[in-house]
Amino acid sequence: LLAAPGGLSTFLSTFNYTLYLLTYASAKSAPLQAKLYQLFTRSPTTTAVDATTHLAALGGLLSSTRTTLRLFGLFPLYAWLRQLMQGPKPGDDSNVAVLTDAKALPMSWSQRWHLPASSGKAPTANIYLWSYRAWLGGVLCDFVRLFRTAQLERQKRAERSVTTDFATREHDEKADQAWWKEMVVPLSWTPMALHFAIGEGGLPGWNLGAMGACGAFAGLGKIADMWAKTA
């Protein structure tokens, strides 16, 4: 699982946001946990509070680790961008290639400046805000790319003769499933990116649990695919 391309990054991201979700759930259920513990042990306890603190600390550590790894990931991203700028591969659509570029460029800018800001090497206020806005721009470009991909797929299916061939129908079903799995990713990231891109205050009612749920859902599909390939 971890040896697959992008496996480590996806695993750490999904695990990190799952920890955020568990931290929020643990904090909200702390009074209930304490009452249950007292009921069975008949003694006061701080176990629930300790568990929440440990989960939050581990989540923060994973977040810092992922930020550092993303910075090193800019080198292969640069090589990938250069390849895309040379033009689409034979049979690929040029608009999809441009949209892929448009998605990657703001996100790479976001990753480039996030670490210096978090480590105190650069002023944080505007850097954080504009890096999150760049991330939101990348997420929105992903929507446009997916809609363009769907449009091309519909055109391709309309041009071919109607067939009941099992292999063709199976191929179409797999393509549709793959498209929806990809769509889940920007759908999951959009609320979080929008919250941080707005600036002070963000979205009303936003909390650690919502952030954890968004991040976990964004990575679950890819985790499931990579796990299936290990079987």
Image (cartoon, helix red, strand yellow):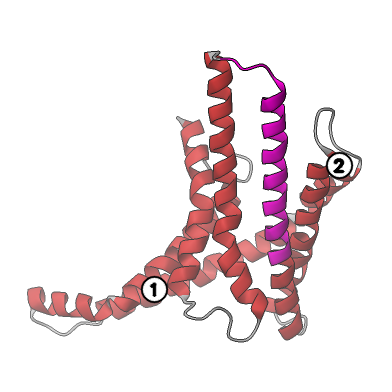
Q: Dominant secondary structure of the magenta stretch?
A: helix
Is residue 161 rendered magenta in the image?
Answer: yes
Residue at 58% over, 85% down: 201
Query: SS at mark 1?
Result: helix
Q: Is residue 109 left or right of residue 220?
A: right
Whole-percent x and y of residue 63?
Answer: 57, 67
Q: Distance from label 2 to label 1 (Cα)?
A: 42 Å
Q: Amino acid at mark 1?
A: Tyr
Is residue 120 rendered magenta in the image?
Answer: no
Pick the front one: 162 or 78: 162
Farthest residue, direction right: 86
**In this view, 100 is above or below 116:** above
Whole-percent x and y of residue 44?
Answer: 16, 85
Is residue 160 visible in this depiction of the protein? yes
Q: Amino acid at mark 2?
A: Gln
* Residue that carries the numbered disc 1 in the rendered image: 24
Q: Residues within 10 Å of mark 2 (few under 14, many from 20)?
A: few
Q: Is residue 10 left or right of residue 154?
A: left
What range of the chain is rendered magenta?
A: 136-163
* Residue that carries the numbered disc 2 in the rendered image: 83
Residue at 73% over, 64% down: 137
Q: Quadrant of residue 3?
A: top right
Whole-percent x and y of residue 120?
Answer: 71, 82
Query: SS at mark 2?
Result: helix
